[in-house]
Image (cartoon, rainbow, N blue to C red):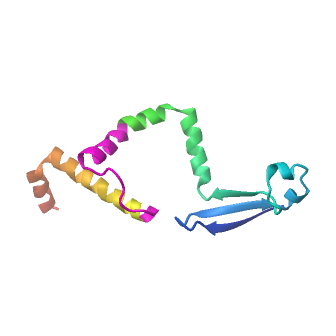
Amino acid sequence: MRRFSTRRDKRDNRLIYIYNSAACQQCPVHNQCTTSPRGRHIYRWEYESVLNRLRQRLTDKPEIIKQRKAIIEHIFGTIKKILGYNALMLRQFSNVASEIALMNLTYNVRRVLNIVGTKNLILHLQNI
């Protein structure tokens, strides 16, 4: 019989499923598998299946990484080198997500200014 419980990670509030089994107590290789008298516990993040599918996809199609590098990696380089965002200042997922969103906004505004020009952007925003 498989039992599970859940808990929230203290650091980033992720939902973790904890699986254990009553069969561990009768298992002949119990001592080789775990030192816990309660048996083995398996911890799984609620989105771990998504990560496993991603790993499998990248193993099956390594050209995806090459395509990603061609499309997005130069943007990260621009953000780090030209805009000067070398390291994140904040911690915790929600804070980091906000900081990255501001970096992306800065990059996108700068890109629009380079493509359209300041005068055309102002004229367009006035017509909205």
Left or right: where 39 falls relative to 70 = right
The residue sitting at the front extreme is 35
* Image quarter hosting the N terminus: bottom right
From which residue to which does the magenta span run? 71-94
Instruction: Please say if 94 is above or below 119.
Output: below
Left or right: residue 12 versus residue 19 is left
**Residue at 43% across / 64% down in the picture?**
94
In the picture provided, is 65 more to the left or to the right than 5?
Answer: left
Report the front residue among 118 and 15.
15
Tell me the quarter of the picture where residue 59 sits. top right
Does residue 127 appear anywhere in the picture? no
Nearer to me, 82 or 121 = 82
Q: What residue is at 17 percent from the left and 44 percent from the top?
A: 115
Q: In which quarter of the image is residue 126?
A: bottom left
Residue plotted at (38% across, 62% down): 90
Q: Position of residue 66 (x, y in %)?
A: 43, 32
Q: Position of residue 19 (x, y in %)?
A: 74, 60
Position of 5 with respect to 56 (left or right) is right
Residue at the location (32% across, 39% down)? 74
How many numbered marks does the figure carry?
A: 0
The picture places residue 13, in percent across and down from the top left corner, at 54, 67
Q: Is residue 106 visible?
A: yes
